[in-house]
């Protein structure tokens, strides 16, 4: 026969174990409910995208790229993949850089920095607009006179690709350095040298070096005023030479 005191202790131990088991089960149920509630909240309309702000886009439509990356109204904010959005935007020819930020509870802010066009490259009857790094931005059937026209024996590239030819990059540097601020400027290659024309003047630029300095020198010469139809020698930009076009350049 079991001692009553021992039997009592056994009952107390069993009861304490049962109570602990119930508490653990309740805590587990509460935890599961909280997790389920959090998951529901994160994917509910309360924390879904209600506003998409796109800043800095002036020359290109980025909505299609943003949508293709999974960003649209109603998307749960936690499921917005900012890396994919940035990658999709920076793949566009006009976009130099991009950022995307989730802003709780319901906003996504996208910022882009667009490339700055500096000139047109004329190839086979059409024009390619390029930025200061030689990246092709778009193709057009006619040029905008606000930018200089570059005529070089080079291949046609698709928008988004970049030129690496040193003569072309030199012409682009000249345009970006201030030479492009002169309306009607055209640049081309003759042998190993670069030449240009503007306002009835011919400009000898020589090899594609010191192009920003040559652009500044051209602007200074034109500002000072020179005879019509002059030959401007800018091979040494610190010592520009101007002569009538029917006389040899110094």
Image: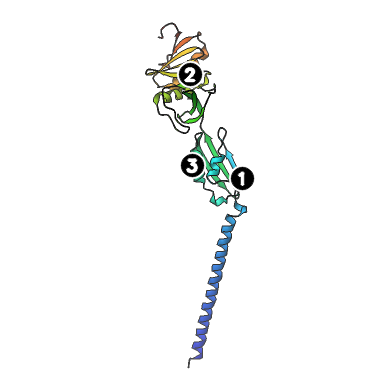
At a point 57% along the width and 43% down the height, the residue shown is 109
Which quarter of the rendering shows the C terminus? top left
- x and y percentages locating residue 184 in the rendered image: 52, 18
- x and y percentages locating residue 145 in the rendered image: 54, 21
- Badge 1 is on which residue? 51
- Badge 2 is on which residue? 186
Q: Earlier in the sequence, mark 2 or mark 3?
A: 3
- x and y percentages locating residue 4 in the rendered image: 51, 90
In the image, 136 versus 22, the foreground residue is 136
Q: Are marks 2 and 1 in contact (CB under 8 Å)?
A: no
In the image, 198 versus 138, the foreground residue is 138
- How many tags in the picture? 3
Q: What element carries label 3?
A: helix
- Badge 3 is on which residue? 87
Q: Do the residues labelled 3 and 1 touch (CB within 8 Å)?
A: no
List the single residue furthest toward the front: 125
Q: Earlier in the sequence, mark 2 or mark 1?
A: 1
Distance from label 2 to label 1 (Cα)?
46 Å
**Callout 3: few (<14), some (14-19), or many (20+) C-alpha neighbours within 10 Å?**
some
**Callout 2: few (<14), some (14-19), or many (20+) C-alpha neighbours within 10 Å?**
many
Q: Earlier in the sequence, mark 3 or mark 1?
A: 1
**Callout 1: few (<14), some (14-19), or many (20+) C-alpha neighbours within 10 Å?**
some
Residue mark closest to the camera, 2 vs 1: 2
Distance from label 3 to label 1 (Cα)?
21 Å
Q: In this view, does 238 lie above or below 172?
A: above
Using the image, tell me which numbered label, if any, was put on residue 190: none
Q: Is residue 38 above or below residue 246?
A: below
At a point 62% along the width and 53% down the height, the residue shown is 46
At a point 56% along the width and 70% down the height, the residue shown is 26
């Amino acid at each position: 026969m079991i001692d009553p005191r021992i039997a009592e202790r056994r009952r107390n131990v069993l009861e304490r174990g049962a109570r602990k088991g119930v508490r653990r089960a309740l805590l587990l149920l509460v935890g599961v409910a909280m997790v389920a509630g959090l998951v529901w909240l994160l994917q509910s309309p309360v924390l879904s995208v209600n506003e998409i702000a796109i800043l800095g886009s002036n020359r290109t439509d980025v909505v299609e790229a943003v949508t293709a990356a999974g960003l649209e109204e109603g998307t749960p904010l936690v499921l917005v993949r900012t890396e994919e959005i940035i990658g999709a935007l920076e793949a566009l020819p006009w976009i130099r850089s991009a950022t995307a930020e989730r802003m709780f509870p319901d906003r996504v802010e996208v910022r882009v920095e667009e490339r700055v066009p500096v000139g047109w490259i004329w190839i086979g009857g059409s024009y390619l607009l390029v930025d200061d790094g030689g990246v092709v931005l778009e193709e057009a059937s006619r040029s905008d006179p606000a930018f200089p026209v570059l005529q070089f024996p080079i291949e046609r590239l698709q928008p988004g690709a970049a030129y690496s030819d040193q003569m072309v990059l030199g012409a682009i540097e000249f345009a970006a350095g201030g030479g492009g601020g002169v309306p009607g400027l055209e640049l081309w290659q003759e042998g190993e040298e670069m030449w240009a024309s503007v306002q009835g003047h011919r400009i000898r630029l020589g090899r594609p070096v010191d192009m920003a300095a040559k652009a500044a020198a051209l602007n200074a010469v034109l500002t000072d005023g020179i005879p019509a139809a002059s030959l401007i020698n800018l091979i040494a930009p610190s010592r520009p030479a101007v002569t009538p076009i029917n006389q040899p350049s110094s």
